[in-house]
Image (spheres, grey):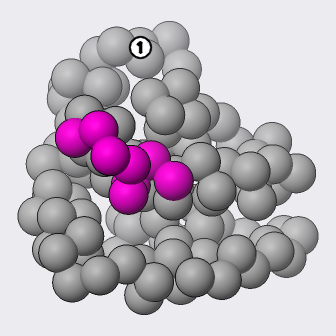
Amino acid sequence: VIAVTVALRVWSRKLLDDHSTVIMQAIKAATVDRDAGVREEGRRGFWALYAIFKSSAEEMMSCFDSRSKKQLEKIEASVNREWEEGGDMWRLTLGYEPVKRDVRSSSMAPAKSKSVKRLGC
């Protein structure tokens, strides 16, 4: 899950499009996994997914129970801080150019490309 999260943060959307369904399945499975550590990394991956595939991530979130949604929302700001310039994950991936966008702003949304297959709940 960590590798998927890093890929979502540093690879271009064009590279990710062909694998979006598998990526979303992995993030969704990790977010509801039995193991607490896997769930935590799944939540981190979710926000990376949100930055690239916003509508699919929102659809995925609508499938989660209220506790899972609260856990996702609880870590959103801290996860985004980790990837900002100077943050822990930014420093670990130094040498890569992280995709910079305000994940809550539609004005910074990536350009439309291939349609992403819906997963459903």
In magenta, the rendered stretch is 29-36
| Nearer-the-camera pick, 93 or 32 | 32
Residue 10 showing in the rendered view: no
Q: Residue at x 34, y 13 (%)?
A: 92
Is residue 35 magenta-colored? yes
Task: From this view, report whether residue 5 is shown above or below residue 62.
Answer: above
Residue 35 showing in the rendered view: yes
Is residue 2 magenta-colored? no
Residue 65 placement (x, y as % from top left) = 29, 81
Residue 5 placement (x, y as % from top left) = 48, 38
Quarter the C terminus occupies: bottom right
**Which residue has dot 1 on it?**
94
Task: From this view, report whether residue 37 is shown above or below residue 102.
Answer: above
- Quarter-wise, where is residue 77 in the image? bottom left
Label 1 crowd (10 A; few <14 / some 14-19 / many >=20)? few
Count of numbered marks: 1
Q: Is residue 81 left or right of residue 4?
A: left
Q: Secondary structure at mark 1?
A: loop
| Nearer-the-camera pick, 91 or 43 | 43
